[in-house]
Amino acid sequence: MLKLNPYLRFNDDKCREAMNFYNDCLGGELTFQTMGESPMAGEMPEAKDKIIHASLKKGDMEILASDMMRDKAIVGDNVALSINCESEEEIKSLFSKFSDGGEVFMPLEKQFWGALFGVITDKYGVEWMFNYPLK
């Protein structure tokens, strides 16, 4: 079975901070590997504290991230991450947590497709869509 995982690129050494924020919001198991812990540590001693790989796992979801990409990430509007919630309580809680320091583009509202839905751009410039199908 194929599985698609988002891979977030961060500038200005924000990977650890952002992934800890997402872990606070979502829970799950968060791991980091720094350049200094990698086999390439001797090649880039000035980057020893940069995150070469981060993983946040919760259930079937896994978000991957790094500070170490070949070029500078450009924050844009071409990708949004969508979370389908299991309860009204969960969507309200996550929406509140993710909006801390971010910008609410669309507040949580009942939508024509029969769901509670809202959109946030978090404080790291990542757009999140939250959806909960109403019974």
Image: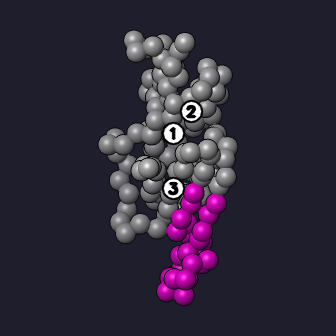
The amino acid beneath tag 1 is Asp
The amino acid beneath tag 2 is Ser
Q: Is label 1 in contact with label 2 (beta carbons under 8 Å)? A: yes
Label 3 environment density (alpha carbons within 10 Å; few <14, some 14–19, many ≥20): some
Secondary structure beneath label 3: strand
Rounded to the nearest whole Å, what is the CA distance between mark 3 and mark 1? 17 Å
Question: Hey, which residue is sitting farthest front in the picture?
Answer: 1
**Residue pointed to by mark 2:** 99
Q: Is label 3 in contact with label 1 (beta carbons under 8 Å)? A: no
Depicted 85 relative to depicted 18: above or below: above
Instruction: Identify the image's colour scheme: rainbow, by chain, secondary structure or one colour.
Output: one colour
Depicted 14 relative to depicted 75: above or below: below
Name the residue at 50% across, 46% down.
124
Tell me, for residue 6, which label it has, or none: none
Spot occupied by residue 104 in the image (x, y as percentages of width and height): 49, 28
**Residue pointed to by mark 3:** 64
